[in-house]
């Protein structure tokens, strides 16, 4: 396996492990107690973001294995467009594209919320209640 592909797959795996860990930290009383997580504090926003990046890195690994490399600027859009082209051609199960679409939409919603909050305060401080994202994190 190409070392670049392996790097992206490792990143994808790290992100999904971190997403699962943050979900458990957010929902498990004993873990929360051990880590002294304040009541009401959750990490569901991070779960969504990490799931998106897991899929993004997996898509980059797949594309790179097919000889397609995407880079900045607009690396995310280029990766999505290339992945979509393969999925809609029938070379790849379209359900994988549906999963990518769903996670990208969740991440997009979070970015819009963050952008709105930023514009309200004029700085990178977000008071978005993470609990509102429980359904998406699941």
Image: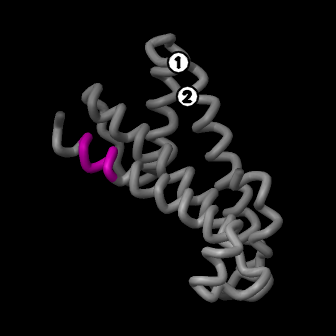
In this figure, which residue is indicated by the disc labeled 1? 93
Report the colour scheme.
one colour
In the image, taking residue 47 as reference, residue 53 lies left or right, namely: left
Q: Secondary structure at mark 2?
A: helix
Residue at position x 32%, y 50% in the image: 10
Question: Where is 93 relative to 102, above or below?
Answer: above
Residue 48, picture quadrant? bottom right
Q: How many marks?
A: 2
Residue at position x 56%, y 50% in the image: 52
In the image, taking residue 60 as reference, residue 100 lies left or right, namely: right
Residue at position x 41%, y 41% in the image: 58
Residue 6 falls within the magenta-colored stretch: yes
In this figure, which residue is indicated by the disc labeled 2? 96
Quarter of the image that includes the N terminus: top left
Q: Is residue 119 visible?
A: no
Q: Position of residue 61 (x, y in %)?
A: 33, 39
Give whichever of 102, 67 is nearer the camera.
102
Q: Position of residue 113 (x, y in %)?
A: 76, 67
Q: Is residue 89 visible?
A: yes
In the image, taking residue 67 as reference, residue 45 lies left or right, namely: right
Q: Residue furthest front?
A: 30
In the image, taking residue 41 as reference, residue 57 lies left or right, namely: left
Q: Secondary structure at mark 1?
A: loop
Q: Position of residue 104 (x, y in %)?
A: 62, 46
Residue 8 falls within the magenta-colored stretch: yes
Residue at position x 40%, y 50% in the image: 13
Q: Please report contact status of discs 2 and 1: CB closer than 8 Å, yes or no.
A: yes
- Label 1, residues with CA under 10 Å away: few <14, some 14-19, many ≥20: few
- Label 2, residues with CA under 10 Å away: few <14, some 14-19, many ≥20: some
- The magenta stretch spans which residues? 5-10
Name the dominant secondary structure of the magenta segment: helix
| Distance between mark 2 and mark 1 Cα atoms | 6 Å
């Amino acid at each position: 396996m190409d070392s670049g592909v392996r790097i992206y797959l490792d990143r994808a795996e790290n992100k999904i492990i971190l997403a699962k860990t943050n979900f458990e930290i957010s929902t498990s009383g004993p873990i929360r107690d051990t880590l002294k997580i304040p009541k009401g504090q959750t990490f569901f926003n991070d779960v969504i973001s990490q799931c998106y990046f897991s899929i993004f890195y997996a898509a980059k690994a797949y594309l790179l294995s097919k000889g397609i490399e995407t880079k900045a600027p607009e690396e995310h859009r280029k990766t999505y467009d290339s992945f979509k082209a393969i999925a809609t051609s029938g070379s790849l199960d379209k359900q994988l594209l549906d999963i990518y679409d769903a996670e990208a939409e969740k991440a997009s919603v979070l970015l819009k919320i963050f952008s709105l909050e930023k514009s309200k305060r004029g700085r990178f401080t977000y008071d978005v209640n993470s609990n509102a994202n429980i359904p998406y994190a699941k």
